[in-house]
Amino acid sequence: MKEWYDAIKEAQSVEKLEEIRISVFGKKGVLAAEFAKMKSAVNEEKAQLAKELNTHKAALTDELTQRKVVLQTLELEANMKAEAIDVSLYRAKCQSGGLHPVMETMDRIIEYFVAMNFAVKTGNMLEDDFNNFEALNLPKYHPARDMQDTFYFKDEMLLRTHTSPVQIRTMMANKPPIRMIAPGAVFRRDYDLTHTPMFHQVEGLLVDEEGKVSFANLKFILEDFLKYMFGDVEVRFRPSFFPFTEPSAEVDISCVFCKGDGCRVCSKTGWLEVLGCGIVDPNVFDAVGYKNVSGYAFGLGVERFAMLIHHIGDLRSLFEGDIKLLEQFQ
Ligand code: DAH
């Protein structure tokens, strides 16, 4: 009998174990043969033999059951190992997105003015001649229109050349006081290192009672704003001309590249022009029917700000959708 115990212990598979079980417990198995021998045995021997055989029967049954559990567990483990999927092997190539530098810059600009209690207004990209030019003191055939050539549709409709028409729309729809900015896309017939046919501006307008709004107010807020955007820079106001403001100024910051020493980017001047502004021209108030008011306005190009903040050389690269460039800003 001993060899059967050994056979059970050494069995390496559930199938092998089943073969052993049949050899031991089957009709023609070892135990059956041993029990058959009892027939020829005498009484005392018979009882003894029967006892022995039953003990073996119980013990072998136990051994079989135990070994079966062990072998089944081993087989299950082996199967699980063989079928295992290495989830780390196939990395899904998905990249998380992020804001485009122009939109991120726009958001920062909006953040500043919202904190200063300015409302955010949007106008129409398809604008009419009145809002885009006429009401802004740019009469037909005025030479200043040449600088803002754009794409025209029928019925004097055009793609807006600046966000200034939102000033007009806001004043026509509301009574003073007004405190608004207008971020958005604008369009012009330009294409070079620093110009694209579509770009973004943020317009600003503040209107209050006559005598309440001064150039000093304008200077204060723009200086504060430019330091918020560019850090510790010098700010300078230069007399200029815009049809919709009088007096008008262009605003420069000390060059962010050379800190004012003079380099290629600032054409050796040490200064970079960043926005236009002024005191709202009375003709603009006349066009919208506002009386006894004063105000200031300003306008800036968002791409120019993004280029100066991120040191980008060619404005056109902001519109190429090149991941290699864009992912540097995430
Ligand atoms: N609209 C001007 C432009 O596109 C920018 C501008 C300058 C807006 C002065 C203003 C302003 O409101 O006061 O070039």
Image: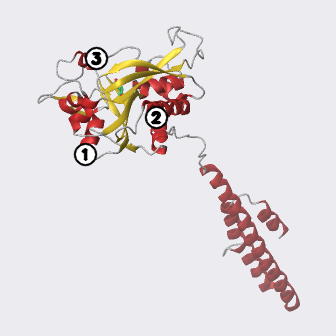
Q: How many marks?
A: 3
Q: Earlier in the sequence, mark 1 or mark 2?
A: 1
Q: Are marks 1 and 2 in contact (CB under 8 Å)?
A: no
On the picture, is 267 further left or further right than 13?
left
In the image, 251 versus 187, the foreground residue is: 251
Say if 63 sits above or below 165 in the image: below
Q: Residues within 10 Å of mark 3 (few under 14, many from 20)?
A: few
User: Dividing the image into 4 quarters, which one contains the N terminus?
Assistant: bottom right
Asked if the residue under mark 3 is in contact with the one under mark 2, i.e. CB atoms within 8 Å, the reply is no
User: Could you tell whether 158 is left or right of 212 in the image?
Assistant: left
Q: CA distance from mark 1 to mark 2?
A: 25 Å
Q: CA distance from mark 2 to mark 3?
A: 29 Å
Residue 197 locus on image (x, y percent): 31, 22
Identity, as a three-letter code, of the amino acid under mark 2: Asn
Q: Could you say which disc has been placed on residue 217 in the image?
A: 2
| Amino acid residing under circle 3 | Met
**First in sequence: mark 2 vs mark 3:** 3
Of residues 268 and 151, the one drawn nearer to the viewer in this rendering:
268
Instruction: Judge from the rendering whether residue 77 lies leftward or rightward of residue 115; answer left or right.
Output: right
Helix, strand or loop at mark 3: helix
Residue under label 1 = 173
Q: Which of pointers 3 and 1 lies earlier in the amino acid sequence?
A: 3
Labelled pair 3, 1 in contact (Cβ < 8 Å): no
Q: In the image, what residue occupies the spot 56% across and 40% down?
A: 91
Residue linked to disc 3: 147
Residue 321 lies, in percent from the top left, at 42, 27
Q: Quadrant of the C terminus?
A: top right
- As measured in the structure, the alpha-carbon distance from the residue carrying label 3 to the one carrying label 1 is 28 Å
Q: Which mark is residue 16?
A: none
